[in-house]
Amino acid sequence: MTHMDFRAALAPVFRLPVPALPVLALVLAVALLPGCGRDGEHGSMAADSAQRIEIWAHAGREEERRTLEAQIDRFRAERPEVRVDLTWIPEGSYNGQVQAAALAGRLPDLLEFDGPYLYSYAWQGHLRPLDDLLPAGLREDLLPSIAAQGTYRGRLYGIGTFDSGLGLWGNRTRLRAVGARIPDDPGDAWSGDEFDALLERLARDDPDGQVLDLKLNYTGEWFSYAFSPLLQSAGGDLVDRAPGGLASGTLDGPESVAAMAAVQSWIRRGRVDPNLDDAAFTRSRVALAWGGHWNFPGYHAALGDDLLLLPLPRLGEATVTGQGSWQWGITRRARDPELALAFIAFLLRPEEVLAMSEANGGVPATRSAVRKSELYGPGGPLRLFARQLEEGYARPRPRTPAYPVISDAFARAFQDIRHGAEPVQALGWAARRIDRELRDNRHYPEVAGTAR
């Protein structure tokens, strides 16, 4: 998967939670949307049905679209009395069209959305809490990371059918050649000092000394997704997550500054390949690569049995990893929330979760599906990703409507630090920008009626 695919699969470039296009144009666009859907072939068949689910989903990769369409067909086969209308929304305009539809009172029953948008949609009152609808057994089957990502202010608003994995890819032969200890457990991650020393040992046998790929060629959300776990492992974070918390003192606190100083040190010492061709690891220019589950097909094809999956280094007591996926939520306009939930429950059956995981490579969202997965189950080559999500090593993104600003501010700080800015200054500027966003919006107080 390329860096552009990362954006497509996990996290598009975020925008503030307002329409990106003029509202009138978007309202008109939304008015035309039903004609763009896939409902024609089935819509007439069940046109008079009293039971109907209108679904909006992002037009992601072809494999994902085919899988969701097949899942809807299987649901229809079981529930022929239900009319299901599916509309694909282009990913680049997804948030804008949701906002326009909300203004026009035309949100669908069931909405798919990228994880961080949940907090904006829930705060704005577009989503219905799922706590009273979701059976206890189904909730207990969810990976803890999925439940954490879907929760806002103590209530569950979204459920994903897959999650993401973040870690280090390693070249077994090159690591063995320098006598590296190979962590085989998330609790056994390299410490910061151990990782530093390993980079130097690898560099001695490397023609240009560049032995680490940080995916500096990626854009957008990558930097918050990939490197905020390093801050968290050091004891810092993007923002103080306590109610009323700010970024100042946390994002520019000593722990976060130390984490970004470590990253800057790797770059300054010449240990990081810029990866302009997105092939630093597959062409064996580097022995280690920061990356995720989407890298597995290409990396495995290139390295075969030499490919290792390792936890990220820890800068404190334990390693921390990222997580995040697209989710399903029920809007407050839903005609029949229980029927909409029945469709989500259908997607969470182990065989359906595995079907989507096979389509996009993501980590299955339920424990029952993980156990049956050849990649993520016991003995599978990607087992580490599932263990990190199951065993509490993953940290959700800050659960606030301000997240797009937080992510953008950190990404800009990362670029400044990469190019030589002092971490304490770059993170300080980012923290002050985030603080302004939070204060200007009074920390997003609960809007009357939205929590019902």
Image: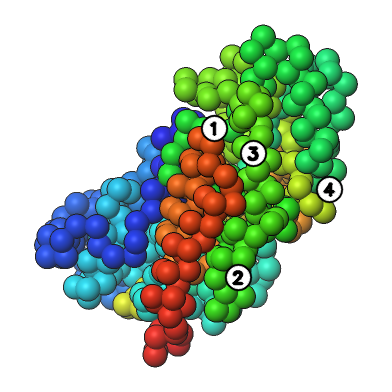
Q: Secondary structure at mark 3?
A: helix
Q: Check whether the beta carbons of the residues at disc 3 and disc 2 lie within 8 A of each other.
A: no
CA separation in Å, label 4 and label 1: 24 Å
Mark 1 and mark 3 lie on one chain; the one further toward the N terminus is 1
* Residue 145 visible in rendering: no
Q: Position of residue 163 (x, y in %)?
A: 57, 51
Q: Give the residue drawn at x 75%, y 12%.
A: 205
| Crowding near the residue tagged with mark 1, few <14, some 14–19, many ≥20 C-alpha atoms within 10 Å | many
Tell me the amino acid under the disc marked 3. Val
| Crowding near the residue tagged with mark 2, few <14, some 14–19, many ≥20 C-alpha atoms within 10 Å | some
CA separation in Å, label 2 and label 4: 25 Å
Q: Give the residue drawn at x 30%, y 55%.
A: 94
| Crowding near the residue tagged with mark 3, few <14, some 14–19, many ≥20 C-alpha atoms within 10 Å | some
Residue under label 4: 187
Tell me the amino acid under the disc marked 4. Gly
Mark 1 and mark 2 lie on one chain; the one further toward the N terminus is 1
Mark 3 and mark 4 lie on one chain; the one further toward the N terminus is 4
Which mark identifies residue 215? 1
Residue 437 relative to residue 98: left or right: right
CA separation in Å, label 1 and label 3: 13 Å
Q: Secondary structure at mark 4?
A: helix
Q: Secondary structure at mark 1?
A: loop
Q: Nearer the viewer, mark 4 or mark 1?
A: 1
Residue 404 relative to residue 234: left or right: left
Residue under label 2: 241
Q: Nearer the viewer, residue 15 or 270?
A: 270
